[in-house]
Amino acid sequence: MSVANQPLAGVRVLEFGTLIAGPFCARVLAEFGADVIKVESPEGGDPLRKWRKLHEGTSLWWYLQSRNKRSLTLNLKDPEALAVARELAARSDIVIENFRPGVMEKLGLGWETLSALNPGLVMVRLSGYGQTGPKRDQPGFGAIGESMGGLRFITGFPDRPPVKTGISIGDSIAALWAALGAMMALRHREVNGGAGQVVDVALYEAVFAMMESLVPEFDMFGFIRERTGNVMPGITPSNTHTTRDDRHVIIGGNGDAIFKRLMAAVGRPDLADDPDLASNAGRDARAKEIYGVIDAWVARHDLARVLEILRAAEVPATHTYSVADMLDDPQFAARGMIEQMRLADGNEVRMPGIVPRLTDTPGATRWPGPSLGEHTDEILSGLGRSPADIVRLRARGAI
């Protein structure tokens, strides 16, 4: 679709920073039509270009994380490159950065400087601990945010050390909060007549905000939520079970009516009709018994039969999907969640589709992550720089 029909068409974003949190925030905006200029060092660019699996020397993650962005190389140690950065910030709606607090100020690109140039600017700042507080100057990656924010403490089994999820979830959660904050700040500026402002996202706070009732439960009852493996105490039944063919199936039977259907499906109508199990509180008090019944039933059947029976009973259930399962699943295909992306060398590779789904103005992939500095000349020309001036800037190492 034409970018003009996308919801963020006309929004200009200048992205500083590297790796995950800041770039993921900018990626979301780019997927919905924002013109995102990603500023990179001429010497190698964003390190994500070399992370994980590489194709012809470039990370496949890079192509996804930077789709729809334009790459501009600026040597931020050069005063002329900094002048370009300030000029772009003066023309942008949003600046995104994920450096340690104070770095942008040292570069002459801090909030006071940029907001003076552009009073309507929204500056999104992602960091480990936020822009204030005694820990603001400490380095903090997503893993630190997950730990301090409470996620690691409650993840895993009680008899083993805490575990991490298989992705950089702390960075990604922070990026989504940052994108939401940017949209709220733009809404304030454009509808309520407000000026620009800073969106300050700390990684630990982004994770902490997802911790459900953790704080009030402790404050009221002194209760500290611990690691509980695959079950959620207080919500029964909801667990992972192993089938006869050694597959893992997730069954969520914690709704009152759903529990009755589940028990009937596994051949235990007596439990379906037990008045003590009619509510979640009663079921939770007998969680061990209920999970024993479900475990035994699942273990007698292969995965396909388990899912067939539970679907017929309208009980939420699925096996744990590998990426191979996702690419073979008709639901993913029907909703366009697997896209085909053509790389610059002509090779095609499948990538995740775009979330969320907007019915009238959906997001779209227009191009994969660009080569380093691919749009430098184009962007500088748009600022009025002549070809000779661009050659001169490149010769002095500014770009």
Image (spheres, rainbow, N blue to C red):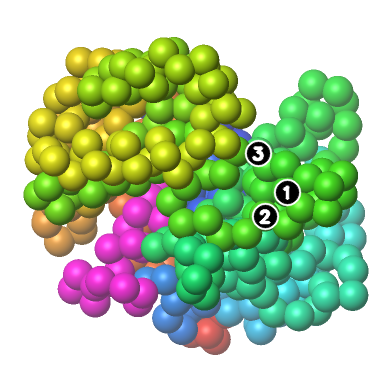
**Is the Cβ of the residue at disc 2 closer than 8 Å to that at disc 1?**
yes
Q: Which residue is mark 2?
A: 225
Kindly identify the amino acid type of the residue bearing the numbered disc 3: Leu
Inter-mark Cα distance, 1 to 3: 23 Å
Q: Sequence-wise, which precedes: disc 2 or disc 1?
A: 1
Q: Residue at x 67, y 55 (%)?
A: 225
Say whether residue 48 is left or right of residue 151.
left
Q: Quadrant of residue 237?
A: top left
Q: Which residues are magenta?
A: 50-69
Q: Does dot 2 land on a helix, a strand or a loop?
A: loop
Say whether residue 353 is left or right of residue 202.
left
Say whether residue 164 is left or right of residue 302.
right
Q: Which residue is mark 1?
A: 214
Kindly identify the amino acid type of the residue bearing the numbered disc 1: Leu
Q: Is residue 327 above or below residue 371?
A: above
Q: Is residue 307 magenta?
A: no
Q: Which residue is mark 3?
A: 180
Residue 60 visible to an observer of this rendering:
yes
Q: Nearer the viewer, mark 2 or mark 1?
A: 2
Q: Quadrant of residue 284?
A: top right
Q: Quadrant of residue 340?
A: top left
Q: Is residue 162 above or below residue 356?
A: below
Q: Nearer the viewer, mark 2 or mark 3?
A: 2
Say whether residue 384 is left or right of residue 341.
right
Q: Residue at x 23, y 23 (%)?
A: 267
Inter-mark Cα distance, 2 to 3: 28 Å
